[in-house]
Amino acid sequence: MAQGVWEMLDNNPATRQTVADEKDLYQRHNSGRVFRFTGVPISGWEELDNNPATIDIVADGGNLYQRHNSGRVFRFTGVPITGWELLDNNPATVDIVAGGGNLYQRHNNGRIFRFTGPAVAGWQELDRNPATVDIAASGGLLYQRHNNGRVFRFTGTPLTGWEELDRNPATVDIVADGGLLYQRHNNGRVFRFTGVPISGWEELDRNPATVQIAAGGGNLFQRHNSGRVFRFTGVPITGWEELDHNAATVDIVAAGGQLYQRHNTGAVFRFVG
């Protein structure tokens, strides 16, 4: 099968994470350094921070956030290195997620909070279930996944306003894009939520090699454990177009109309067609 064309954007062995929104692409190094892509492959990366405590970055709607190993959360205000605003300082924070202009955090005890401002004090608690192990957000919608595979959507009322969408113990990942929600099972099966809780899940693929799904700009992608990358073309099960087949691929990121992949060498590529 013919594969697509990929443009190398960087080739730094220190790169451990890439994230993107509709506007920008960022990378994080194992040293905590954070960079923004300015448009020129290889040389066009602007350093935004250099803190060894940084272990995660998240981008959404033109905003960039970072999380430290201490649980501290920062928002980039526009000035490289010095322009980071502290939003929270809670050692229980283990995950941050952004979507639809909102920033959320999840604690190691399953509690979920939304940032409402001001900094540090301005976090609204949305749930407090110790079974919560994952949250996903997009287009103003927020979802959570429990360690037993149950999936919920936030309906607007803190603590009590969670609608159960599924209860399958095989579910190990949820991904949101716009108004769409997808789930991946531990056997590689991929499903799309069609609107009816519990029963309303359409199976899109059933390949045991699938280890990652990513969604952005209305597109759904999957990565296999062999490094193969596919785009969903609309027909369940059979409608997957192969975009690449490189054993070095360890991560894919989708945002807006762009797809990126990262290799185990630190190389970063953009799909160009």
Image: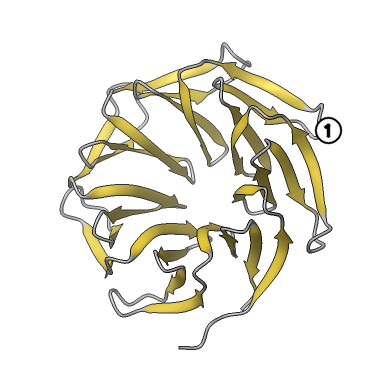
Instruction: Give the residue type that dot 1 points to.
Output: Val
Q: Residues within 10 Å of mark 1 (few under 14, many from 20)?
A: few
For residue 52, above or below residue 223:
above
In this image, 189 relative to 118: left or right? Answer: left
The correct choice, above or below, for 226 with respect to 30 in the image is below
The residue sitting at 52% across, 72% down in the picture is 246
Quarter that holds the C terminus: bottom right
According to the image, what is the colour scheme of the structure? secondary structure
Q: Residue 264: percent from the left, percent from the top?
A: 56, 58
The residue at 82%/26% (across/down) is 82
**Residue 175 spot, x, y in % from top left:** 40, 50
Instruction: Name the residue rendered at 49%, 69% in the picture.
Output: 247
Front residue of 152/272: it is: 272
- Position of 139 with respect to 8 (left or right) is left
Q: Nearer the viewer, residue 273 or 211?
A: 211
Res. 64 image quadrant: top right
Percent coordinates x, y for residue 218 in the rendering:
48, 63
Residue lying furthest top: 121
- Residue picked out by circle 1: 79
Q: Quadrant of residue 75?
A: top right
Name the foreground residue: 191 vs 170: 170
